[in-house]
Image (cartoon, rainbow, N blue to C red):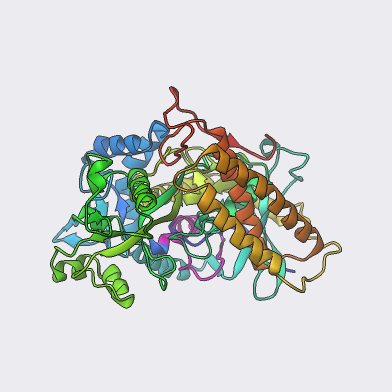
Amino acid sequence: MKIIKTDFLVIGTGLAGLLSAIKLSQKGKVILLGKKSVFDSNSSLAQGGLAAVTNKDGDFESHIKDTLKAGAGLCDKKITEITVKSAPEAVEELSKLGVNFDKNGTAYSLGLEGGHSDRRILHWADRTGYAIVSALAKKASSIKNIKIFENYYAVDFILENHPKFNKPQSNSCRGVYAYNAKANTIDSFLAGKTFLATGGAGKAYLYTSNPDCATGDGFAMSWKAGLNLKNMEFVQFHPTCLYSPQARNFLISEALRGEGAVLLTKDGKRFMRNYSSRGELSPRDVVARAIDCELKKSGEDYVLLDISFKSKDFIKKRFPYIYQNCLKYGINPAKEPIPVVPAAHFFCGGVEVNENSLTNLKNLYALGEVSCTGLHGANRLASNSLLEAAVFAIRAAKTARQDYAFSSSIKNPKHYIWDYGKTGHSAEEVIITQNWKEIRTLMWNYVGIVRNEERLLKAEKRMKVITEEIEYYYNKYRPNKNFVELRNIAITASAVIKSCLMRKESRGLHYNEDYPGKADKPKNTVINRYL
C-alpha cells in the first residue's frame, strides 16, 4: 500500500481530465489516474464532433436557443450562455494543443446534427474524440509536471472527516483511495485539489455505446461522500448503435442523419415524420422513443439507417471510421442500409457543481459527464458534451490555480491508510457476475427508454436486495476491480431509479407512461444519501 502526494489529482483520462491536467500543470505537480490506458474513455469514442460557434462575432443566440429547446425547460440559462460564449476560446485552446479539426480551405468544415438549426459541428472525419484525446494525451505525456498512473480504479474519496458524521459543506476532500489492478492493493493518493472526471455509467445498461470502463465510479464515490446527485433520471439513449452479434458497442454517428441518412422499418418504410415534423433531425429523445415504439409494434430487433443514396466516395471521405467498421461486420453502407438500435449513451445528470465545477465538498471539482452543470437540462443537444468538457476543464483549472496556496496542506495531511479489517480474499466471484448481469438487464427492461411506475417500483425493490448482497460481500472480502465496478453500477442504478420515481411527469429523456404530460413548473431532481 503506497501513499503518493501531489498538488493536483485528476481522476479520468477523457477530454475533461486531460485538458484540466495540462492547464493545472502550469501551476504545480499533477497526477493523472486512468482505469486502463488514456484512450479508455467515452471521449475517445466520440464520433460526431464538438458543437461550437467558432468566432466571437458568430450567432451565439441560435446555439443557446437550440440548447434550451432540447433541454425541455431544465437548462440553466446562465450556464448555457457561459458555455456557448466560451466556445471560441475552447476551440482555440484545443487547436493550440494539436487538435486539427477538418477544414475547407481556411474555414472549418461544419457538420449538422439533430436538434441544431445550423451547421456548427466541428469534427475530424468521424473520429473527433479520438483526435482530441490523441492530441491531449501526447501533450500531457510530454509535460514533466504530469505523471500518469494507468490501471488504477478510484474507490473512495479520502475525506478530512467521515461522511457519516459530517455533511459535505463541513468536510474536505484530501484525495482518493485507488485500487492498483497490477499490485492488487489499495493505494492512497493525497492532493490539495482533486478533479473528478470519471465519465458516465453506460455499463449500468444491457445495451450501451460506452466502453467497459463507464461504470458510474464518480457518481458512486460522490454519493458515498454525501454529495448531491442531480437529474439522474435523464439518461440519453443514442438512437443509432450498430446492431450486430459481433459488435458490442459501436456507435453510428448522428452526423449521418445530418448528411441526409433516413430511418426505415425493416420493410423499407420511413417513419420519423409520424413522430416529429423535423423527421430524422429531431432531438435524440424523440428519435430514440420513435425507434423503440416501432420495434415494440413490429416485434423486430432493429430498424435501418440508410445513407446508400450517397456516393461511395462521399461516405468513405466523410465517415471513414464508420465505413470501415461496417465492412468489418459484413455491411456496406454505400450499398445497403445499416441495422441500428438505441443504446444507453450519456448521463445528462450527475454531481451537482457550480459555474466553476466546484462541488459542495471542499477542494473537489467535478467536470465532464460525471458532473451536472445545468447545461443539458432534460436532454443533451448533440455534440454539446465535448464543448462542455473543454469549457469547464479550462474554468475549473483556472479557479484551482488561483486557489493554489491551499495545496500546501498536503505536506502533513490528516489521513488514514485503507483498513482491510478482517476481510479475506474471495475464492469465487459468481455473486459479482450474477449481480452485474442482473442489474444491467433490470435497468434495460425496467428503467429504459419508456418507463412506468410498476416497473420502476419493481426495479427499486430488486435493487435493495442486490445492494444487501453487495454490502455483505464488501464486509467479508477484500475489494478487487470487478467488485469495485459492481458496487458502483449498483449505487448508480439505485440513484437513477430513485430519481425516476421522484419525477411525476414526462420531460426530455424521462418518459413515464403513467405521467405522459409535463408539469407546469419544471424542477430539478436532487438526491443524496442524507435524504
Q: Is residue 9 visible?
A: no
Q: Residue furthest front?
A: 298
Say left or right for 99 vs 157: left
Report which quarter residue 478 is drawn in.
bottom right
Q: Is residue 261 magenta?
A: no
Residue name at image x 20 percent, y 44 percent: 118
Q: Position of residue 2 (x, y in %)?
A: 72, 68
Residue name at image x 34 percent, y 66 percent: 131
Report which quarter residue 269 is drawn in.
bottom left
Q: Position of residue 309 (x, y in %)?
A: 14, 63
Residue name at image x 62 percent, y 61 percent: 436
Residue name at image x 47 percent, y 70 percent: 141
Q: Residue furthest right?
A: 422
Say left or right for 398 vs 164: left
- Bounds of the magenta span? 16-43
Q: Position of residue 59 (x, y in %)?
A: 22, 39
Q: Nearer the viewer, residue 321 or 12?
A: 321
Report the number of numbered marks: 0
Say left or right for 377 vs 525: left
User: Which quadrant does the C terminus fall into?
Assistant: top right
User: Which quadrant does the N terminus fall into?
Assistant: bottom right
Q: Is residue 344 visible?
A: yes
Q: Is residue 37 magenta?
A: yes
Q: Residue furthest top?
A: 520
Vertical comparison of 369 with 152: above or below: above
Q: Position of residue 336 (x, y in %)?
A: 21, 68
Q: Nearer the viewer, residue 374 or 453?
A: 453
Say left or right for 456 vs 80: right
